[in-house]
């Protein structure tokens, strides 16, 4: 997986600091919306509603990436999802490494900018609800790619580890 320059992805230059501000804002917006839903609906129903909304968002995002890949005349591979992903995950904001182990792509994330915001707000439980988005993105993009989260910072791990395997 090659990293592209952020300016190439966005079509113009933007600083990492500016991007961090947008990520912080987005994470806080999610937090306050999710928190209010849980307060109004109760923990069980509110958490369920938040997770359903996140899954719907994830599928939508995956479907949009799918459309871009197909419009470009490309196959729905893992590499093409990364190339057309709607967030600049190949930047310094996400400190991650990715490697191939047999037919499986393994990504380890040492720093998630969303996760940092939620940890700083003592909102790991709400942050964990958001993590359902990863499964839904891949489901929307290409259900023939098996996504699995092996580790998660919100479940006591020091990093997030995810695997991807084309069927």
Image: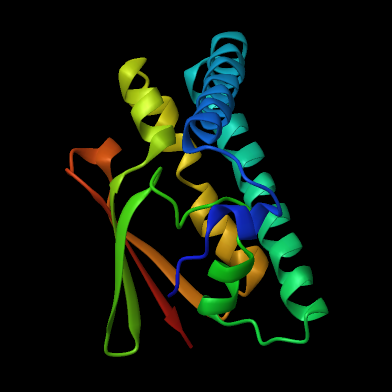
Q: Quadrant of residue 39?
A: top right
The residue closer to the viewer here, 125 or 1, is: 1
The residue depicted at 48 percent of the width and 54 percent of the height is 89
The residue depicted at 75 percent of the width and 61 percent of the height is 64
Residue 58 pos. (x, y %): 63, 51
The residue depicted at 69 percent of the width and 49 percent of the height is 12
Q: Give left or right: position of 1 versus 136.
A: left
The residue depicted at 62 percent of the width and 45 percent of the height is 13
Q: Quadrant of residue 144?
A: bottom right
Residue 71 pos. (x, y %): 82, 77
Q: Quadrant of residue 59?
A: bottom right
Q: Is residue 24 above or below residue 85?
A: above
Q: Give left or right: position of 116 versus 16.
A: left
Q: The N terminus appears in which quarter of the rendering?
A: bottom left
Q: Give left or right: position of 61 versus 95.
A: right
Residue 154 pos. (x, y %): 29, 36
Q: Which residue reaches farthest front? A: 13
Q: Give left or right: position of 155 versus 81.
A: left
The residue closer to the viewer here, 46 or 60, is: 60
Q: Which residue reaches farthest right? A: 71
Q: Is residue 23 above or below residue 81?
A: above
Residue 63 pos. (x, y %): 73, 63
């Amino acid at each position: 997986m090659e990293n592209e320059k952020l300016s190439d992805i966005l079509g113009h230059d933007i600083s990492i600091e500016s991007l961090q501000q947008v990520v912080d804002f987005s994470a806080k917006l999610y937090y306050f919306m999710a928190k209010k839903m849980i307060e109004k609906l109760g923990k069980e129903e509110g958490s369920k509603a938040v997770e359903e909304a996140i899954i719907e968002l994830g599928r939508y995002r995956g479907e949009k990436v799918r459309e871009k890949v197909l419009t470009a005349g490309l196959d729905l591979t893992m590499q093409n999802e990364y190339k057309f992903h709607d967030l600049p995950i190949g930047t310094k904001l996400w400190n991650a490494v990715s490697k191939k182990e047999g037919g499986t792509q393994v990504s380890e994330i040492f720093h998630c900018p969303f996760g940092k915001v939620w940890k700083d707000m003592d909102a790991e439980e709400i942050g964990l609800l958001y993590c359902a988005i990863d499964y839904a993105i891949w489901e929307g993009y290409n259900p023939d790619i098996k996504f699995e989260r092996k580790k998660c910072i919100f479940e006591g791990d020091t990093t997030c580890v995810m695997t991807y395997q084309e069927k």
